[in-house]
Image (cartoon, grey):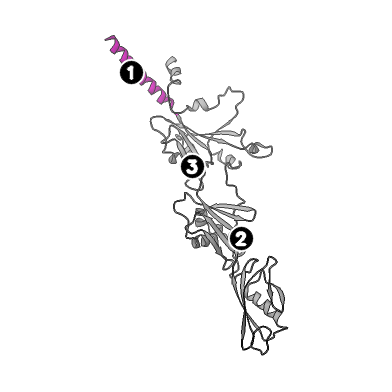
Amino acid sequence: MLFTAACSGLPRGAALQSEIRPSRTADAEDYAFYPVTRALLPTVAAWPGVGADRSDGWPRAGEGSLGQIIQPGDRVAVTLWDSSENSLLTGLEERQASLGELVVSPSGRVFIPYVGEVRITGMSPERAREAIQTQLADIAPSSQVQLALVEGVNNSVAVAAGVAAPGIFPLRDRNMDVLTLLSLAGGVSPSLRNPRIRLQRGSNSYTTSLGTLYDNPQANALVQAGDTVIVEQDDRYFLALGAAGKEDLIYFPQDRVTALEAISLIGGLTDTRADPEGVLILREYPQSALAAGLRGPREDRVIFAIDLTSADGLFSAKSLQIMPGDVVLATESPVSSIQVALSLLGGGVGFARQLSN
């Protein structure tokens, strides 16, 4: 008994599960302890998430107009044609008059001589041409208008980072999706880990992963004038500690990481040290998760215990999702402590014999 008690004082790299697991006689603990089983999974899935992306969701794919739409800040090149004699629009022996590139005002108008301001914002170039020509009909019935659109910033989208060629790209139509825009920007940098796509639209910020856009066509949303797209690598991580293949900060290689995948990412358990019945997931929930009327854990600090020696534990670990900031702790096996103690005891006996000799 004295020998077994002394084992707890031996040097080791991680705690025993019995040292962390709450005792049955404890009156109160400031953390909740949950063995991971099939019955627990639906309960945990209903709890609030931890460390989720700050996002307003993600817009769904749709269909837009195939034509150009004029916006304030755009420029329109207007040329007036008139074959009549003594035309107010053209000079002697001339059949055309170029007004140059006119900037669409914030109110959506351009100034046309002899007519005044004509509102063209929200129109296609063809519709704007007709609107100007209609206004000219009273002073030059035979005149014709030629109009070409040069998109401005308000009629463009920006790709700010994470691509081969960041820049501002004009919207040639209203049917450009995110993947098409990224392609125009030279594609996503291959050095980014699990690239995340952030779409800023006004006061809203939407976030998803590049893999989601590849796998789900409904997620390949249309961009809108004024959008900014930023491509970033995934900085979510969990910590690996204890009797594992490595103790390190492990970045998420994909959108979703399960507990079983996390054990694989940390190099598995150390055969000679780890307790396969005691893989612990330590997680902190926000205080808001404990609010009355909300489904959540009993305490803000939670420990999930995984038993890899049972079929239920293995299957459940395959479904339990790791959250950013989690700690995956591989506890020490009590047997390894006894083995260390025996080796020390054997070494001590041998040393005493050498002294007596």
Q: Is residue 188 magenta?
A: no
191 horizontally vs 299: left or right: left
Residue name at image x 38 percent, y 32 percent: 271
Q: Which labelled disc corresponds to residue 328? A: none
Residue name at image x 46 percent, y 42 percent: 261
Q: Which residue is mark 3?
A: 318
> Few, some or many C-alpha atoms within 10 Å of disc 3 (few <14, some 14-19, many ≥20)?
some
- Of labels 1 and 2, earlier in sequence is 2
Q: Which labelled disc corresponds to residue 226? A: 2
- Foreground: disc 1 or disc 2: 2
Question: Where are the magenta residues, as a range?
Answer: 332-357
Q: Does residue 177 sit above or below 244 in this rendering? A: below
Amino acid type at mark 2: Gly
Mark 3: which secondary structure?
A: loop
Amino acid type at mark 3: Lys
> Few, some or many C-alpha atoms within 10 Å of disc 2 (few <14, some 14-19, many ≥20)?
some
- Foreground: disc 3 or disc 2: 2
Tag 3–tag 2 contact (CB < 8 Å): no
Q: Residue furthest top?
A: 356
Mark 1: which secondary structure?
A: helix
Locate residue 134, reporting x and y percent: 70, 80
Locate residue 266, reporting x and y percent: 44, 39
Amino acid type at mark 1: Gly
Q: Which labelled disc corresponds to residue 347? A: 1
Mark 2: which secondary structure?
A: loop
- Nearer the observer, 226 or 289: 226
When asked about the image quadrant of residue 244, the answer is top left
